[in-house]
Image (tube, rainbow, N blue to C red):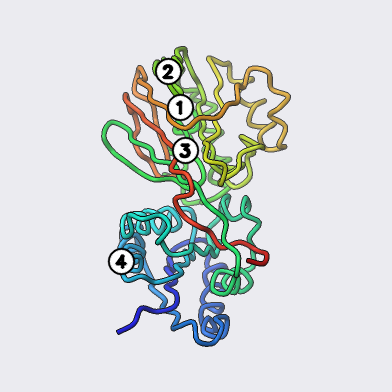
Amino acid sequence: MSAPGAVVVFNRQAGTAARRRAVRAALASAASAVPAGTGEVVVRETASPQDGLAAARQAARDGVPRVVAAGGDGTLQAVVAGLVAGQPDAAARPWLGIVPAGRGNDLARALGLPAEPRAALGLALAGERARPLDLGRLVADGRELLFVNAAGLGFDGDVAVRARRLPLRGFPAYALAALGSLAALPGPWEMAGTIDGRPVRGAVTIFTVANGHTTGGGFVIAAAARPDDGLLDFGRLGPSRRAEVLRLLWRALRADLGREPRFELGRFVELTASFSPGIPVHADGEIVSAGAREVTIAVLPSALRAVVPGQG
């Protein structure tokens, strides 16, 4: 039996009920979005990241030319991990389509994808242009995760831990969790390691790593970050008072962090560091550790190709 022309991995629990209905309606007419002769569109409904990873991994092993992630950041992270696991040759991996159905959708924003599900699905299935997409690989105390958009250590990791406990998702959850982290103001954490071989040492309150330019559904941490430049951007804030962190968050929301002199921006290929005490870490909102002591983060350049608007 020949491989389908495309596999859509749809997380039936992602986003709001209205958003899920819109995605289902788009999926019902998915076959009409595919050019004649390009093969069947197969929809794999999932209820967990593990299911999404397994579906994408199998599609990559079967040689499916295009795999679409329809869901939120967790779905996208799982699909990406499955594609990488299923096909070791980056050039042979399926094109990645994205239907942003979650509440954050930061990478979709960075790639200029349509927000409306039917338009996004049409592009994902029939788009003629794909651009290289870097990934990040994060290892914290031996646990490894790939991330597509952003990873956070310290305050950002603490916010992610708190956000996961809330019944909300996306920007509302991030904003409410950030208020909780502000009230507690954890840290700072002593950091010692290297960034691209250069020694780095000092206390940090915030250490955010960005592949895309926004995180948390709209906070602009690294305005110049590009998901296809072969580098990861970072933002670092040293020991700070509550008012300083609040000002930084406000400026991130307004895309105005360039005016924050204490917020250091930079880029790297690989970072290795130890932290004391253990630091909370997230990757695309997935909690990697509530208190990691050893962390390595590296870019995987051009690991995938993502379908984007425009001609091939």
Question: Going by the picture, which residue comes out furthest to the top?
Answer: 202
What's the amino acid at mark 4?
Answer: Arg
Q: Earlier in the sequence, mark 4 or mark 1?
A: 4
Q: Secondary structure at mark 3?
A: strand
Q: Name the side, left or right, on which 179 lies relative to 151.
A: right
Q: Secondary structure at mark 1?
A: strand
Q: Residue 217: percent from the left, percent from the top?
A: 59, 47
Q: Earlier in the sequence, mark 1 or mark 2?
A: 1
Q: Marks 1 and 4: in contact by CB < 8 Å?
A: no
Mark number, residue 151? 3
Q: Residue 101: percent from the left, percent from the top?
A: 54, 63
Q: Secondary structure at mark 2?
A: strand
Question: Going by the picture, which residue comes out furthest to the left?
Answer: 142
List the residue tagged with mark 2.
Answer: 189
Q: Nearer the viewer, residue 206 or 272?
A: 272
List the residue tagged with mark 4.
Answer: 61
Q: Marks 3 and 1: in contact by CB < 8 Å?
A: no
Residue 19, quarter of picture? bottom right
Q: Residue 144: percent from the left, percent from the top?
A: 31, 41
- Measured Cα–Cα span from mark 3 to mark 4: 28 Å
What's the amino acid at mark 3?
Answer: Ala
List the residue tagged with mark 1.
Answer: 154
Q: Earlier in the sequence, mark 3 or mark 4?
A: 4
In front: mark 3 or mark 4?
4
- Measured Cα–Cα span from mark 1 to mark 3: 10 Å
Looking at the figure, which quarter contains the N terminus? bottom left
